[in-house]
Amino acid sequence: MKFFKTLLILFFVTSLSAQNITATFDQLLQEKYPDDGPGATVLVAKKGNVLYRNAFGKANLENDVAMNPNHVFEIGSITKQFTAVSILMLEEEGKLSVQDKLSKYLPSYPNGDQITIHQLLNHTSGIKSYTAMQGLNAFGKNDKTPIEIIDYFKDEPVDFQPGEQWFYNNSGYIVLGYIIEKVSGITYEDFIQQRIFDPLGMKNSYYGDKSRIIKNRASGYQPTAQGFRNATQISMTIPYAAGSLMSCVDDMLLWHKAIRDNTLITASSKAKAHANTFLNNGKPTNYGYGWQINELNNKRSIEHGGGIFGYVTQGVYIPDEDIYVIVLTNANGNSPQDITLKLAAMVMDEPMFTENKTVTLSKEQLQQWVGTYTFENNVVRFVTLQGNQLYSQRDGGGKIKISPTNDHEFSFENSFATYRFSIENGKKTVLFKDRITEEKGMESNEKPAAEKEGIVLDPAIIKEYAGTYQLNPSFSIVITTEGNQLFAQATGQSKIEVFGEEADAFFLKVVPAKLLFTRDAANQVTHIMLLQGGQEMKGEKIK
């Protein structure tokens, strides 16, 4: 779940020589991952050739160990690619079908005769994701078998009926790992090692283990209001087939090439993994099997990120240009998603951003698109003109500059998003596009709601909320204070101000969302509840 929309910093570029790539990328990454904090390793390849490979920040803060490109990270949910390919390998061997029912492998699983392997792979099964359940930190301290993890979530109420909705779900991949073991006759760890790591020469990739000595392991960190701390420790049997693997950027390039070249699975199986799948009503999920489906600069992209205690990762592949970018980081709270996409966009044959992208329009040309637009999903956006600058403002959110690229198309500041205005049947319309997402808005008479004002709270009380709240292994909210103002910073996102509504209840102005704090019997703040988009996420105060 996104706390609020991450904005992407545009970098204007016409073309980059090999020398410019190094200098430009070094500058961007140095700013994002400075020398005195947790860092990142980065690899950019095009047509199989490494264009850029470097490391930034620290691999270990306590021992002042600088990061180098050989460091090994927990890759979190990028593990799901390996699990999905393992399933497809077994399907090619005739040992299972993605259309098999879950009940074939777990006869007692509730509703198992309605759930397919396909739905487990593409997050449409509806089963409860165990990482969203309360008590996971305590449950995850000790090693568990796959069945013990499945028993932890299997009797939870379903989120929806199979195929009716898409909701990212770690439980589905736990079940897939169990199926791999049952069908292959060996453990998931051994399957990955023997069938993938060893044949591909991935000598610095592992099934995660906190006690094992792993050469070049980068330590993981989590942000707090007082600075970084060592990441929460859980048994690596808990993320299992949903997020247990470890690797380095060089091994991830070997993995990418194996998928690209159909080394492990056939082209037809890869096509299934990289194909957009659909709900029962025909709407796309923008997800395949272990990979998200998107686009970058109007070119198809296959990508996935990972987040686990102390590590956040991101990989993107642009098939049309054979561009692969992988970024591995050793701290929560500074997501590599934006920088990964930016690096990929900058090495395209036609880079996404150019110095001459924007044009100058007259005030009359800008004025013609001013108005209120209501979208199919009931979102309302207001386009306003101040001086010679157009702004877009989502109802309840902040204003964002939009700049013209021609007389009817505009780009959002610090974002990949665009507007395309037109006139249909005498009414103004706008197509909002944010990479693969498209929404059409029609001119309407909606009026912006009056901005809600926050109440003033005692600074001494506000300080009681400060701390780090863990909502799931890859998502935390850090609460800090400045005088009588409260600020929230979610994993990988900017710090924003939140406003008092009543005691222990706060709201955001940039998006429609609330933060509710709960206390124990001693009146100490212990948990936070994020309310956004009709969903609730509860997090424990861990620092």
Image: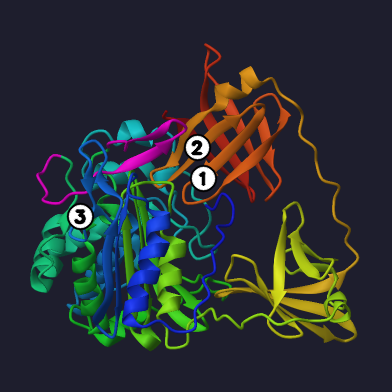
Which numbered disc covers residue 276? none
Residue 291 figure quarter: bottom left
Disc 2, SS: strand
Q: How is the image coloured?
A: rainbow
Contact? badges 2 and 1 (CB < 8 Å) = yes
Q: Mark 2 sits on what residue?
A: 478
Residue range corresponding to the magenta coloring: 211-233
Find disc 3 in the rendering and name its residue. 72
- Identify the residue at image location x=50%, y=74%: 278
Magenta-span inclusion, residue 214? yes
Q: Nearer the viewer, residue 296 or 275?
A: 296
Is disc 3 placed on a helix, strand or loop? Answer: loop
- Whole-angstrom CA distance, mark 2 to mark 3, is 26 Å
Residue 15 figure quarter: bottom left
Residue 153: tell me if it is visible. yes
Residue 166 in the figure: left or right of residue 326: right
